[in-house]
Image (spheres, rainbow, N blue to C red):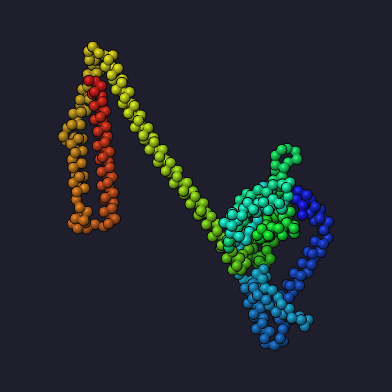
Amino acid sequence: GGGLGGGLGLNQRGGQLGGQPQQLQQQQQQVSGALEAQLMWNALKLPAVFGDERDKTLLKFNHLQAYYGTGKGLSASSGSLNAVNFSGENPFCRFKAICYSRLPSGSNEDGQVVLQFKKPVSELSEQLEAITKSLQELVGASVQVAVESFRALPDNCSEMAIYVLEKSTVTSGTHKLLAADVFMFLQNATQWTQLQKLGVDHIFPKTGISEDSLKLYLQQPPAGINPQLWENGKSENPDPQKYIPVPVVGFSALLQRMKQQQQESKQHQNRLEILSSKIDELRQSHSTTVARIAEHRRKLLELSHRVLRVMVAQEVLRKSGCSVQAGEEQLRVHLEGIQTALDTPLQFKGRLNELMSQVQMKGQLSVGDAISKCPVDQLLLQEIEQHLMQQQEALTQLVRTVKEGFADLQCIEEGFN
């Protein structure tokens, strides 16, 4: 097999020339399907294998297998014994349901093709460089293979999305090959054999569904699905713009779907943990920034006080030898009034001293004695303790504010003196 660029055109021409054999193969499949349907009907109607009462028992057994969608039934026609495979697609299977999957997003121009591997994602990550090199040798040197992403799948499987870049003949840049072209090239027997050696189990293009294809898919129910069940599934679709009904036949399909949902939930949980760690980092950075802002505010206040002292000293020098003006006398009287109000025993300073003494006395009491004298619920004790701590913090802050006010007043007094 040649490279991707040249081999693709040959495959397309071969497909056009081989149209008649493909039609013959389709006709053979139709004949085979009709024969299997007739054999199934004979097995479920009257097997006629023994010609006695045992045929009724065999008939019930065939019905049971058809309902379960598994096993092989027996029937006789024209003197020959025939075996019938009861798959989940037969119309008599009872274990069927309609679920919903998200409509695939993506376009053919994105060029992404998904390769599914029968190996865990850890092994795929270790062999990523070697697999990329093998894919590059597979498509040829005229194009370049690039890995878009890879993720884990249930049952220790994984998948990898790739795209192929081709150098433009018009400009010096590159462009992506269409996903359908890359998919057709990798489906060839030679390329598929090489992919299987790499551990690839399945390939498909990561493209969306056209409106015509979606309409055709919804118009005809899948094989073995009751038309009424299919119509109910379409009418109960929670969001036809985002979801598409898909049949689930048998317990194995249901188990596979459950594993896929668990895998998606696990990936969502991992993503949430990553976001949570980033939020914690942002919170820590925010705390550091708030602390720096507080430090800068403190420095700004110190510089403001220094500037105020300089301004006071400059004003004293400028007014040296001058008499005290009326406005300055009023300011002095006002400041002395504030100082007197703060020093009054029954006002702010006295109340603060009283509260501080009460807090110190409460702190000296034993918690065990308090509980023994007045048994209180433990949760209520915690709430009371938290409330007292908040009060103590408020009082401490109030004392700090008063002290800062005293310090500012002292600076102003020193400036005036």
Tell me the quarter of the image containing the N terminus: bottom right
State the residue at coordinates (67%, 76%).
72
State the residue at coordinates (32%, 28%).
302
Q: Is residue 226 visible?
A: yes
Quadrant assignment, res 70 = bottom right
**Left or right of 332: which side holds 120?**
right
State the residue at coordinates (20%, 35%).
349
Q: Residue 368: horizontal and vertical position, in percent?
A: 21, 56
Q: Residue furthest top?
A: 321
Q: Is residue 412 above or below residue 232?
A: above
Nearer to us in this view, 239 or 148? 148
Tell me the quarter of the image containing the C terminus: top left
Quadrant assignment, res 77 = bottom right
Q: Residue 32: horizontal and vertical position, in percent?
A: 76, 70
Q: Residue furthest bottom?
A: 52
Q: Is residue 236 visible?
A: no
Q: Residue 373: horizontal and vertical position, in percent?
A: 18, 57
Nearer to us in this view, 260 or 54? 260
Q: Is residue 281 above or below residue 31?
A: above
Q: Is residue 43 above or below residue 183?
A: below
How many numbered marks, from 0 up? 0
Nearer to us in this view, 37 or 322? 322
State the residue at coordinates (65%, 54%).
131
Q: Residue 83: horizontal and vertical position, in percent?
A: 71, 77
Nearer to us in this view, 385 or 75? 385
